[in-house]
Amino acid sequence: VIVKWQRGVPVYGVDVMTPTLVGTLAVGMLGFVLVAYRQVVGLGPVTGMSNAYPWGIWKTFNTMVLTALGSGSFAIGITAWIFKKRELHSVMRTSLLISFLLYTTGLLAIVVDAGRPWNLWNMALPWRWNTHSPMWEVALCMPLYAFFPLLLENTPPILERIYYLHPVLQPSIRRLVPIIRATYPWVVALAYVLPIMHQSSLGALMLLAGARVHPLWQTPLLPLLYVWAAAFIGTSVVLVTLLLSLLAWKRPIDTHAMRALASLTSDLALSWLVVRLVDILVRGQFGTAFTFNSYALTFWTEMVSIGAAGVLLRRQVILERPDRLFVTALVMASGGMIYRYALPLLAFAPHAMAWYTPTVQEILVSVAFIAWCHAGFLVAVKRLPILPAPMSDWDDLVDYIRYLAPWIQMTRSRHATSEHRSGYAY
Amino acid sequence: MHLSRRQALGVIAKGGLPLLAASATAGVAHAEGESAPVAPADAVSMLYDTTLCTGCKACVSACAEANGLTPDARLDGLHQAPLALNEFTKNIIKLYDPVTGPQSFVKQQCMHCLDPACVAACPFESLSKRGDNGVVTWESAKCIGCRYCEVACPYEVPKFEWSARNPAIVKCEFCQHRLSVGLQPGCTTACPTGAVIFGPRSVLLAQAKDRIGAAPDKYFEKRVYGEHEAGGTQVLYLSHVPFTAIGLPSLAADERPGRYLYWQKLAYKFFAVPIALYAFAAAKMHQNFIEHDRELREEHRETGADPQL
């Protein structure tokens, strides 16, 4: 049976309040307690940061790495909407949810990491802007993206839920639809320009560190390589998340869409790899990759995982099995994460003799932010029509809701039968 | 002339290209003008000479006194003996003591670069370079505590108050509060041997070159550190040992933010590139969205289920 994803369908018939969710929320709450403690005692006693390594994992991992993980929606969106790759529309809602969760927690990490967050109101005073600072660009552009286009792109599933569950609000939502339709392209176009801006600026941040960033990473092309890496990390994370969710909740997989996503990831990653290698060769720094040290090791781990995964994502033997595809996409995402993490931390060598080791509290806060993402995802996919499914799954949902709550009016598709449920395509 | 919306968008999108070209040209001209940063007219300066320094550290305590800093006595609980520049120390004397060869003291403080990386990095102009005397100062109300200045500074000078609830960025501000009332900085006032002296940059640079001219073999590489390093600095060094040995990094004249951020500045000039990208994306989105909407409606007619965006 060929499965074609046609719409988002919530994961239904399962509990929302599972032990997993409770555990995840507990970790998240612990993070908030530690954040409160950090605000009282300052950054020094809580973190492993020092004057030599002024940026720890909150900024470098939670913001610089994890927002790359959340960059799937702009890469997939551009491919689907601008370059008309239609089969990718079905995975948009999933990628948008991932992006929103990772971006909000990434932004929260910046605020927690900022020594004087109360001065962030300077963002509202244009005469104090240093428009040439990549940090200014990130500070303004990233929240703008997360809380304007990205948030709006995430509202249709929420409106849909309200529409069905609260019939009294239906007329107002109907009135909203033409407004959303009219503004959608203009808002969504912003959702493609803003990430290109701040994801490249995240790379530009380290330009100013000059020779203190290892030459395998330090290049004038940093902004380009950084946003490009975000694109393929983002798409592989959507692959990983989708496959994990679909396998966990036993939902049918659209081979065609998954292949489109895999080939997009592979194209982006392999072309990135070529640009990265040519850049290193042109700058005459390839020799440094053959020294036996942690930099070369990091470099090769990154290169081999991205290169191997990029090639494998084109191979039938990987594409035909969801579990293999999952592992390959995971390797790809990890390789990309190493690149993103290496630039601000692993490849950064200050003159001062020092090393940075994150403290337990620091790691717990970092994990807590990830826990909030996980919890948000679990609740959202069970309550909102996000994960892609064929029309028959929608009809099954409608039947299920009719049985459970006959007063809720949902439209079934015309041709399906209630026991029809597509087989697993792979 | 009547334009349909799509035509108008096309014009806007195409208009972006010449705009881009124009701004690129403007950017190149701008960058060329920036290629060698010049010292402000009344640039103040410090000249430190390792051959004259006796390591008495009078400048260290004078600095703490002039800036109202708590003396850093964490080493033995008694003496002001900081190990490095830190949140209590804006100025320090260190000893370079090799197994063989000559020893040397070195004074460390902010270099007050002509093209300061910390100022380029600072998102809200908390760190800024004064237009009159070129002193790089820090302003509390604008600082968000992002510590990008610490990452950017090639001399690793700005320090952060890690244990404070309202942490400040601590660095030498050339005793601007003393300069403004006609006094010299604390350190140059205190120095008993004239190892560190205060004066206009042009004068001190000439004086440094005179010293090299008088005794060329005395000084490493027969040159003044800070004349060209990272675009030039307002603190100048003469040394009898290699500069890198006493913690002064070797920096080419173009290793400075003006060049590092060249493309970044170009791309954001008049916001031309983002605007052009947006015009293109919006035009394509608008066109493809209409198509997509039609497909959704067709699907709805066919299946009867409510369409999803």
Image (spheres, coloured by chain):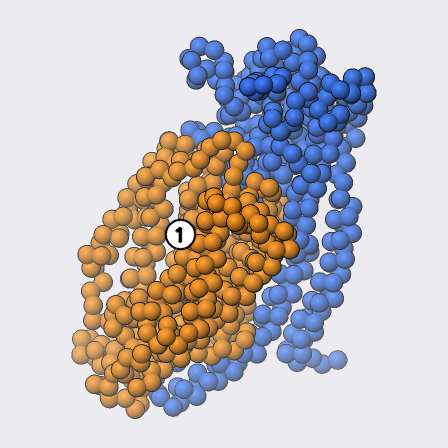
Q: Is residue B81 left or right of residue A248?
A: right
Q: Position of residue B81 (x, y in %)?
A: 50, 15
Q: Nearer the viewer, residue B99 or B204?
A: B99
Q: Residue at x 45, y 49 (%)?
A: A297
Task: Note the chain letter of the orange one.
Answer: A
Q: In the rendered structure, the residue with mark 1 lies on which chain?
A: A
Q: Is residue B113 above or below residue B279?
A: above
For label 1, the SS is helix
Q: Is residue A264 above or below residue B179?
A: below
Q: Nearer the viewer, residue B203 or B3?
A: B203
Q: Is residue A343 left or right of residue A174?
A: right
Q: Residue at x 43, y 48 (%)?
A: A61
Q: Which residue is mark 1?
A: A105
Q: Is residue A395 above or below residue B120?
A: below
Q: Can residue A212 be seen here?
A: yes
Q: Quadrant of the N terminus of chain A?
A: bottom left
Q: Amino acid at mark 1?
A: Thr
Asked where in the image residue B272 lies, by quadrant, the reply is: bottom right
Q: Is residue B56 left or right of residue B293?
A: right
How many neighbours does mark 1 have within 10 angstroms: few (below 14), some (14-19), or many (20 or more)?
A: many
Q: Quadrant of the C terminus of chain A?
A: bottom left
Q: Is residue A150 above or below residue A50?
A: below
Residue reaching furthest top?
B192
Q: Residue at x 78, y 17 (%)?
A: B215
Q: Position of residue A310 (x, y in %)?
A: 46, 66
Q: Can residue B121 be seen here?
A: no
Q: Position of residue A82 (x, y in %)?
A: 55, 74
Q: Residue at x 62, y 65 (%)?
A: B277
| Numbered marks: total | 1
Task: Note the chain letter of the blue one.
Answer: B
